[in-house]
């Protein structure tokens, strides 16, 4: 050991001092370089917003794999599918509709404090609405419709002071509507329909401005908005007393003397006798007219005459509060003045019940094309379908010589009658926003038939006359499933040509085989009809040797967009027209495999450029 130490000492002593100092400086600068370099290296730790989204993902089952690129290794979530960020890398949009996500909504969504738009509709989300959503104070659009959310509507949603669009329809929400929603002063679109909400609708703030369409489908709601008097008001003695005290008869009789009061009674009795006699004459006259009218109508509505009045009306959903006899009695009184439409599947009548509820009745003549068992089986399938963009089938009657289908009545009729070339002069033209809204609703209904029904339903007759509109111009798809029903085939592939000339896909006209892609083609023609106001069956297209799709494609290639657009639309952003035309061209591609699915069509329509309810979720000046 001593020799070794002495050797080391001798070796060190032989090194010159300048060399030692030089090595020390080299070590120092090398260490400093490492420290500086290490500090400047980028860090790949995920942002808190990204971590919150990963927790949201962890609680979901993702059968389609739409969240596969959500990874912990990313620095921020801005490249993830369905996520959009501001220039400062804050998440401002989470857009994952129609993604077949199954599970609860994580409360950590409330950590996305810069969020402007949350679109999770048409999935299979369940559980309660997270109270933490109230932390997203900049949220402007919340789309959670068509899921399985349950529980109460949190009153904390009233803290979302920036929100303009709130749609939580088509869920299983219960309880009362929180009055705090009335404090949302910027709210312009509200939809709470098709839930299990109860009680009086608050009239505070903006809630008083929304109509029945925002609350329909909640059978236990009452209030002025739905024109239903609450039971508590009917049983409140103070209300009855106030009404009695305010009666003009009570206020007039009180100060009168007894003699005057007797004279008034005599005059009232004589007046009553006169009115009763007049009413008796009216009843006799009415009975005479009714008898005559019924006799005349035997040739028009002969299949539903009194010989079949005992036939049972099969009711779906149990929400049609009439007996079969009451309905058949009203149907017997229908004549040509009640016709509101006709087509390849039959004639449609307007049916008004005694309590002024209105329905549409489609009369389908029997010609031996289908057997009773198949007809009833197919109708049972159609009867269980419920979607906000499908016409609601209430019931049916399988009579001896005809079939009757009972639907909800939609007051604005069909789209064909409202387009520029067909609308009455007193009806205002459809704006561009109206047309986008109608296109989006029709797409959602068709996507539901293609993707959410089992077995899938191919419509086969998409056209403007089969798009019915309610009082808010919300689109409802009519005649779905009737083509297969009338054919009576038990095979999923149909070979009988149905549909309307001008809307038919080329391969459908050649082979007679309908598919989802033939529906997509017809929908693309419908989009072009909405854009241009031109009818696909216009004779000028035949004279030109083309059709609506070919005509539009020619003008697009020539960059003549102004010649395509219906001039009654008003001012429209060119970007929106180009996006709509691009979608229509894709849907009407001659090659079926190049056409998008209706799921994809819905996603494209709900993009920022084409959204009928734009959320305006990003404002560069506010970030």
Image (cartoon, helix red, strand yellow):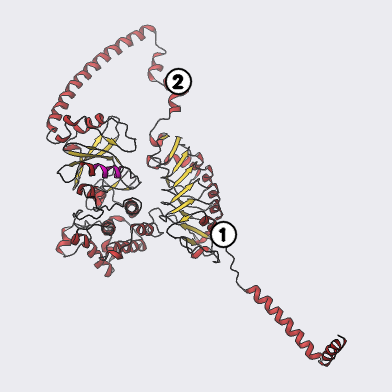
**Extreme front residue here?**
1
Query: Is 178 positioned to the left or the right of 279 in the image?
Result: right
Query: Which quadrant, please, contains the N terminus?
Result: bottom right
Query: 443 and 260: which one is in front?
Result: 443
Relative to 371, say whether 439 is above or below: below
Relative to 292, say whether 197 is above or below: below
Image x and y of residue 252, in percent? 39, 16
Instruction: Looking at the image, tell me whether mark 2 or mark 1 is earlier in sequence order.
Output: 1
Q: Secondary structure at mark 2?
A: helix
**Extreme top residue here?**
259
Foreground disc of the pair 2, 1: 1
**Residue at image mark 2:** 241
**Is residue 16 on the magenta stretch?**
no
Q: Is residue 592 visible?
A: yes
**Residue at image mark 1:** 51
- Mark drawn on residue 285: none
Image x and y of residue 322, in percent? 29, 31
Secondary structure that dominates the magenta span: helix
Q: Label 2: how many residues lie within 10 Å, few (<14), some (14-19) or many (20+)?
A: few
Image x and y of residue 26, in percent? 73, 85
Query: Is 188 positioned to the left or the right of 17 in the image?
Result: left
Asked if the residue at tag 1 contacts the one at tag 2, i.e. Cβ–Cβ closer than 8 Å, the answer is no
Distance of mark 2 from mark 1, alpha carbons? 61 Å
Query: Which quadrant, please, contains the C terminus?
Result: bottom right
Query: 561 and 138: which one is in front?
Result: 138
Relative to 37, say whether 157 is above or below: above
Image x and y of residue 145, in percent? 42, 48
Which span is picked out in magenta? Answer: 375-386
Residue 374 lies in quadrant: top left
């Amino acid at each position: 050991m001593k020799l070794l130490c002495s050797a080391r000492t001798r070796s060190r002593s032989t090194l010159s001092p300048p060399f030692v100092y030089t090595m020390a400086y080299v070590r120092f600068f090398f260490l400093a370089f490492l420290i500086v370099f290490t500090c400047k290296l980028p860090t790949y730790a995920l942002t808190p917003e990204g971590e919150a989204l990963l927790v949201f993902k962890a609680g979901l089952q993702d059968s389609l794999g739409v969240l596969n690129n959500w990874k912990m290794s990313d620095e921020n979530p801005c490249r993830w599918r369905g996520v959009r960020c501001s220039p400062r890398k804050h998440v401002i949009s989470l857009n994952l509709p129609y993604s077949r996500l199954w599970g609860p909504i994580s409360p950590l969504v409330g950590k996305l404090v810069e969020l402007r738009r949350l679109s999770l509709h048409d999935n299979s989300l369940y559980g309660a609405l997270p109270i933490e959503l109230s932390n997203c104070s900049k949220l402007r659009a919340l789309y959670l419709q068509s899921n399985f959310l349950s529980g109460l509507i949190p009153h904390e949603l009233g803290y979302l002071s920036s929100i303009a669009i709130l749609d939580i329809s088509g869920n299983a929400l219960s309880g009362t509507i929180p009055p705090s929603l009335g404090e949302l002063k910027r709210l312009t679109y509200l939809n709470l329909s098709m839930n299990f909400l109860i009680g009086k609708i608050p009239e505070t703030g903006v809630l008083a401005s929304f109509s029945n369409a925002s609350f329909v489908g909640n059978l236990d709601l009452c209030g002025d908005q739905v024109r239903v008097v609450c039971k508590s008001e009917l049983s409140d003695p103070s209300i009855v007393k106030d009404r009695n005290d305010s009666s003009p008869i009570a206020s007039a009789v009180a100060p009168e003397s007894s003699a005057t009061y007797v004279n008034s009674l005599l005059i009232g009795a004589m007046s009553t006798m006169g009115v009763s006699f007049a009413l008796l004459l009216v009843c006799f006259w009415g009975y005479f007219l009714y008898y005559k009218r019924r006799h005349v109508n035997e040739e028009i509505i002969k299949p539903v005459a009194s010989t079949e009045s005992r036939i049972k009306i099969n009711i779906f959903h149990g929400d049609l509060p009439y007996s079969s006899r009451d309905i058949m009695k009203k149907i017997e009184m229908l004549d040509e003045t009640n016709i509101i439409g006709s087509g390849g599947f039959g004639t449609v009548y307007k049916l008004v019940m005694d309590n002024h509820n209105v329905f549409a009745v489609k009369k389908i003549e029997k010609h031996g094309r289908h057997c009773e068992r198949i007809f009833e089986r197919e109708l049972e399938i159609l009867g269980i379908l419920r979607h906000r963009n499908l016409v609601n089938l209430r019931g049916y009657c399988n009579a001896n010589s005809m079939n009757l289908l009972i639907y909800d009545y939609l007051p604005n009729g069909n789209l064909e009658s409202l387009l520029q070339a067909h609308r009455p002069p007193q009806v205002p033209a459809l704006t561009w926003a109206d047309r986008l809204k109608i296109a989006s609703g029709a797409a959602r209904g068709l996507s539901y038939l293609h993707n959410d029904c089992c077995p899938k339903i191919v419509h086969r007759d998409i056209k403007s006359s089969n798009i019915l509109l309610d009082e808010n111009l919300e689109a409802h798809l009519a005649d779905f499933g009737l083509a297969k029903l009338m054919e009576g085939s038990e095979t999923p592939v149909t070979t009988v040509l149905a549909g309307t000339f001008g809307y038919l896909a080329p391969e459908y006209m050649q082979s007679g085989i309908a598919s989802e892609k033939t529906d997509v083609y017809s929908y693309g023609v419908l989009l072009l009809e909405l854009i241009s106001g031109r009818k696909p069956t216009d004779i000028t297209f035949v004279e030109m040797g083309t059709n609506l799709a070919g005509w539009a494609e020619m003008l697009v290639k020539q960059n003549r967009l102004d010649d395509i657009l219906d001039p009654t639309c008003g001012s429209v952003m060119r970007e929106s027209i180009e996006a709509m035309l691009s979608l229509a061209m894709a849907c009407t591609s001659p090659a079926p495999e190049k056409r998008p699915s209706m799921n994809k069509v819905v996603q494209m329509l709900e993009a920022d450029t084409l959204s009928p309810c734009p959320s305006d979720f990003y404002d560069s000046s506010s970030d």
